Amino acid sequence: MTAKNIQRRMLKKQIEEFADKHKASQIISQKALELEDYKKAKSIFIYINTDDEVSTDKIIEDAFISGKRVFVPVTSDIMRLVEIFPNTRYKRGKYNIKEPVDFIEANIQPDIAFIPLVGFDKNKNRMGRGKGYYDRYLENYKGKKIALAFAVQQTDAILTEKCDIAMDMVITEEAIF
């Protein structure tokens, strides 16, 4: 097992043991909604969270109310962006992640991207789940890259590789980096 995989496993354990994900998610979401970049955005790319990720429900709901276009990832061999709407129906997709049943692939690059992670450091280096889907998408992305994370996901230094994409900002319940 590589050092990066050991670090990923340790961070996943910290997330699993973190008991107050709901309260922390509410605080993180509110901070995201108060960002000037979010307020100005006409479109957002955002993940649909799993149980061990910061909840994105409040942000998605606000985006619809605010008239923003909302795009989420759909994963097969590659990750594609698809637009969702308030009445979109969902199913469990690859990796048991909720995905839209019917969709049209995005033909724009959203203004802002909210990205999940397993861990991060003070330099805004991001560790994902190890499949590289987000890094491959983000290598050509020109908008603002914002990771949503619990404070327990911070570590001194993320072991990075050349293909890893750092975030422009990381929001936790305790701080914004």
Image (cartoon, grey):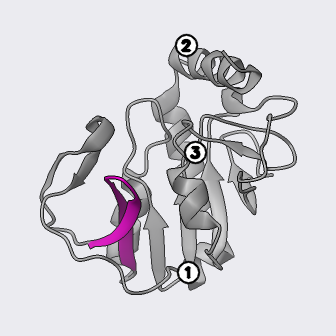
In terms of depth relative to the viewer, which is nearer, 40 or 170?
Answer: 170
Can you give x and y, in whole percent of width and height, for residue 2 in the image?
A: 71, 20
Kind of residue at disc 3? Ile
Front label number (1 vs 3)? 1
Label 1 vs 3, first from the N-terminus: 3
Label 2 vs 1, first from the N-terminus: 2
Front label number (2 vs 3)? 2
- For the residue labelled by badge 1, is the local secondary structure a helix, a strand or a loop? loop
> Residue 147, which numbered label?
none
Disc 1: CA contacts within 10 A as few (<14), some (14-19) or many (>=20): some
Segment tinted magenta in the rendering: 69-83
- For the residue labelled by badge 2, is the local secondary structure a helix, a strand or a loop? helix
Q: Main secondary structure of the magenta part?
A: strand
Instruction: Report, in whole angstroms, how far the alpha carbon at label 2 lies from the one at label 3.
Output: 19 Å
Please tell me whether residue 158 is drawn above or below residue 78 in the rendered image.
above
Find disc 2 in the rendering and name its residue. Answer: 17
